[in-house]
Image (cartoon, helix red, strand yellow):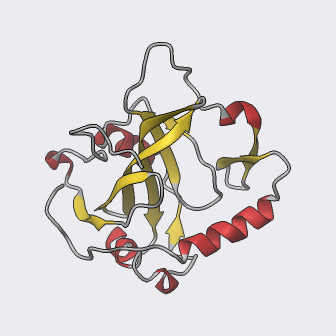
Amino acid sequence: MTAPPPGLAPKSPPSWARWTYYGYLVPPAGAAAQYVWTRGPLVVISSLIHAEFRGELRWHWLVSVSGNLTGASRRAAVLASPKDVSNKEKRRATDDELATVRKHFGMDNAEEDNHQPGCGRMLFRLCDARPDDPALCECKETEEVVTEPDGFTWSKERGADADQMRAAENARQLLGRMTDLGAGEDP
């Protein structure tokens, strides 16, 4: 993987916003780093990823927001042991909560672009946005949008089975990996 330019890191909130840095996740392929932040019932995974945008590999900030009915600390703690989290404990962030995260993580102009039916709401923003960049990811033009009963939308490849994708997302959530448990210093 290409190393990110010097000084480029996942988004972090300002200290006045009172988020707790919980630790970091082992980054998946294509990601340089992932930090976990908690505040009230919210868990944010802030990532720096190298992904394709309109046929070109570019650096993106990805901020994933999810909520928890039993408190964010519990949710963050079980990233290491996701089998301990029941589906009843997880929930999607509300529009108001997402607006707060946008503000605190500097993602006001980010695109919400969900590619899975899980509880996370994904915000993407190019790190090196140029004036000629289209506003939307090409997936909006090539993929099918699925609307869940609660109004949440996500996209999938045309012809893909939404039920199979939901099952795969549930299985993926059981594979979370936390390498630094406990509150840490701000990155």
Residue at image position (58%, 76%) is 87
Residue at image position (65%, 58%) is 117
Residue 45 drawn at (x, y percent) = 38, 57
Residue at image position (25%, 47%) is 12
Q: Residue furthest right?
A: 159
Is 93 above or below relative to 179? above
Number of numbered discs visible in the structure rendering: 0
Q: Residue furthest front?
A: 1
The answer to which quarter of the image holds residue 44 is bottom left
Lateral position of residue 93 relative to residue 139, left or right: left
Q: Quadrant of the C terminus?
A: bottom left
Lateral position of residue 119 relative to residue 148, left or right: left
Q: Residue furthest bottom?
A: 84
The answer to which quarter of the image holds residue 118 is bottom right
Q: Nearer the viewer, residue 158 or 107?
A: 158
Q: Nearer the viewer, residue 87 or 125?
A: 125
Residue at image position (46%, 61%) is 28
Residue 24 drawn at (x, y percent) = 30, 65
Lateral position of residue 187 relative to residue 102, left or right: left
Is 139 above or below relative to 38? above
Residue 146 drawn at (x, y percent) = 75, 48
Residue 153 drawn at (x, y percent) = 67, 47
